Structures are given as C-alpha cells and as structure tokens.
C-alpha cells in the first residue's frame, strides 16, 4: 500500500479553510469543465481532472477536516495543479502546509509565487 500526501491550511497559525465543498467543486469545474467531482456522502469529494499533465489528477478533499489528499504515484504535478488553482481561487492568502501520511512533520508550501514555485516546494 502506497503513501498519501496531504495539504491543508496551516491551522497552527490561521485555523482551517472556510470554503465549502460546493465552492471546491465550482472552482474545479470552472477551470476544467470535463472534470469528475463526486462524493460528499462520506465527507469526501473525489476529483479526477485532466489538467494537461502526463496523467489525470486524482485527489480527494476531506470536507470535515479541510484536507486535500492524493496518493504518491509518480509525479505530483497534476494534483498539485488542481490544489493550487482551487486555493488561489478560494483562499489565496491562507498559509498552506503539506505532510505525508506516515510522518506528520508539517512543511510549508508557498501559494503566493505561482504554480511553478508551489510545485517546486513539494518533494519530487
């Protein structure tokens, strides 16, 4: 079984994000109209989006805890592209952190310098 990466607001400094699952859905569909966004019945949105990367972005958004998650399966570019776009739309000034499921050592991600810097701040 593989690892999962998680991304959330830096709750130690600002608390959780205040946007809703519906706002996440609307943001994703606005940028990638042919995306599949399903769920909400078990407090998760499941997102599959073709963002022009080698493989589609497959990620989830935990509605209860305000956490984006995706599996460690190759390049993180596609899911990070979706997360960056949604956060740029819905919470552009909120500090962001990431962690891997087996090590909750929170690491910052810089949302303010654009997509390339956001992706570069993530482990390859």
Image (spheres, grey):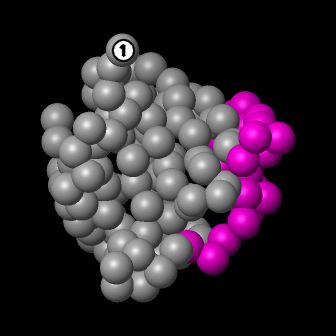
Please provide the residue range marked out in magenta.
17-43
Query: At 55% from the left edge and 73% from the top edge, which residue is drawn?
Result: 17
Of residues 25 and 101, which is closer to you in this image? 101
Q: Where is residue 18 in the image (x, y as percent from the top left)?
A: 63, 76
From the image, tell me which residue sits under label 1.
Answer: 1
Q: Is residue 1 above or below residue 41?
A: above
Of residues 72 and 28, which is closer to you in this image? 72
Residue 20 magenta-drawn? Answer: yes
- Could you tell me if residue 1 is visible in this image? yes
Q: Is residue 36 above or below residue 1?
A: below
**Is residue 58 left or right of 35 when viewed as pictured?**
left
Q: Is residue 24 above or below residue 20?
A: above
- Could you tell me if residue 77 is visible in this image? no
Query: At 32% from the left edge and 28% from the top edge, which residue is drawn?
Result: 3
Q: Position of residue 124 (x, y in %)?
A: 17, 35
Q: Which residue lies furthest to the right in this view?
A: 41
The quadrant where residue 106 appears: bottom left
The tally of labels here is: 1
| Circle 1 SS class | loop
Q: Position of residue 31 (x, y in %)?
A: 64, 50
**Is residue 92 left or right of 47 when viewed as pictured?**
left
Q: Residues within 10 Å of mark 1 (few under 14, many from 20)?
A: few
Q: Which residue lies furthest to the top in this view?
A: 1
Of residues 44 and 78, which is closer to you in this image? 44
**Is residue 105 left or right of 78 when viewed as pictured?**
left
Quick one: quadrant of the N terminus? Answer: top left
Query: At 60% from the left edge and 33% from the top edge, which residue is drawn?
Result: 49
Q: Where is residue 28 in the image (x, y as percent from the top left)?
A: 65, 49
Residue 95 magenta-drawn? Answer: no
């Amino acid at each position: 079984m593989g690892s999962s990466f998680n991304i959330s607001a830096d709750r130690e400094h600002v608390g959780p994000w205040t946007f809703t699952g519906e706002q996440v859905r609307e943001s994703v569909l606005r940028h990638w109209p042919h995306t599949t966004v399903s769920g909400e019945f078990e407090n998760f949105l499941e997102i599959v989006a073709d963002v022009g990367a080698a493989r589609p972005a497959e990620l989830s958004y935990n509605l209860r805890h305000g956490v984006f998650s995706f599996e460690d399966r190759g390049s993180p570019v596609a899911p990070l592209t979706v997360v960056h776009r949604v956060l740029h739309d819905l919470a552009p000034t909120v500090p962001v952190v990431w962690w891997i499921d087996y090590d909750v050592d929170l690491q910052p991600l810089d949302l303010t310098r654009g997509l390339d810097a956001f992706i570069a701040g993530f482990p390859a």
